[in-house]
Image: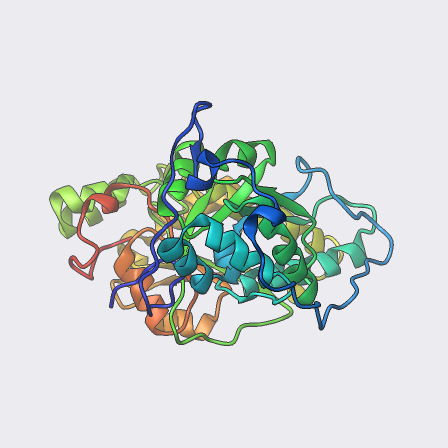
Amino acid sequence: MSLDPVQVMSGQVKELKVGPSSNGDSRGSWEEKEEFDKDKLGLTTKPKPVTGRRSRKVEGGVFFPKPENAVTVAVSSRVLFRTEREQKVFEQEGVEEYLRYQIEHENEPFTPGPAFPFVKALEAVNCRLRELYPQSEELFDIVLVTYNHAHVGIRLINTINHHNLFIERFCMTGGSSPIGYLKAWHTNLYLSADADKVREALSEGIAAATMFMSEKVTEVSESQLRVAFDGDAVLFSDESERIFKAHGLDKFFEHERENEDTLLDHGPLKGFLEALGKLQKKFYAKGQRLDCPIRTYLVTARSAASSGIRALKTLRAWGLEIDEALFLAGAPKGPMLEKIRPHIYFDDQMFHIEGAAEMGTVAAHVPYGIAQKHNAKQNPTVRK
């Protein structure tokens, strides 16, 4: 099985190609053309009237939390919604036809993409937080990030209203790199279909992952956010993974036993788990530990007795709680994830991403660490 970002393993749709601009950002081909307006686009039909829009209402409390107080999740429009058809128009017919198509269809909402259930779950947690802490700004704050020209914003807004999503913050870059904006938003997690931009975000210290989705999609909870993490090179550094790659399994086990009281260094997603834990503790403080709408999972190919103790001691020393820890000792992760039914699963190795997708789990690839230098189809008993 071969996965393409957000293409649901059907047709191949290329990434929007960008080149350098004078300010150092990346820009799409439309940035080299003159400014667009509707008259120049030569629209042949008027946009259809929007239907099915529902009103949104927040009862009291904080409406827009300050970015520095919130847990900010930046989501690309291409992972929040399904935009394969529009991408084909861009690739095959060019930017002017693409913009014309978007405007003519701006009142036709996009269908949900792989990040959609995750975002809905974030909003469900916010509803619970607002009930318990009406004036608190410690909430999830979702920012929609898109390379699109501002003309496409109307369709995105109509889509958000149609699906009753609470997303008020947009970042429409017109082809420029969004990474600088992510830092300004104090972003805790960035989800995208663009692997290059994900790597760029990681290099800037921003937790990020490339989202994948299969044709088989498992139904997930609407009331409890479930987030599953791999261990090495995701929550933790790739130190132990490097030992395994260089010296084999026996040396890996020996290294872990000798260093079980030495904390692992942090990995790229440690900060996001920390943010989730901070919100969980707000529910615990109100006596809702057993009814918490956030649940976290460690799903690792490490063996419990041989190499698990170091991982658990590291999490405890960090002051982080994992609700469930699954040490699979090299067994496939897909069947376990099918039972967990997470809204998102983070892993640094593509064969685990593929195995998760085969079982219907929405998976996100974290392109970090030594595993990126090895073939994704290598030995499936990799200890991580």
Q: Residue at x 39, y 33 (%)?
A: 203
Image location of residue 80, percent across then percent down: 53, 59
Say if residue 5 shows up in the picture.
yes
Q: Is residue 43 left or right of residue 368?
A: right
In-front residue for pair 32/17 = 32
Q: Which image quadrant is residue 119 in?
A: bottom right
Say if residue 143 shows up in the picture.
no
Give the vertical position of 61 relative to 185 (above or below).
below
Give the vertical position of 304 relative to 148 (above or below).
below
Image location of residue 209, percent across then percent down: 42, 49
Image location of residue 142, percent across then percent down: 62, 50
Image location of residue 350, percent across then percent down: 28, 57
Q: Residue at x 66, y 56 (%)?
A: 157
Q: Is residue 213 left or right of residue 250?
A: right
Q: Residue at x 29, y 41 (%)?
A: 369
The N terminus, quarter of image: bottom left
Q: Which image quadrant is residue 368 in?
A: top left
Residue located farthest toward the left when viewing the structure as drawn = 247
In-front residue for pair 365/89 = 89
Count all numbered tags in the image, as a single digit.
Answer: 0
Way the structure is coloured: rainbow
Give the vertical position of 164 relative to 35 (above or below).
below
In-front residue for pair 19/333 = 19
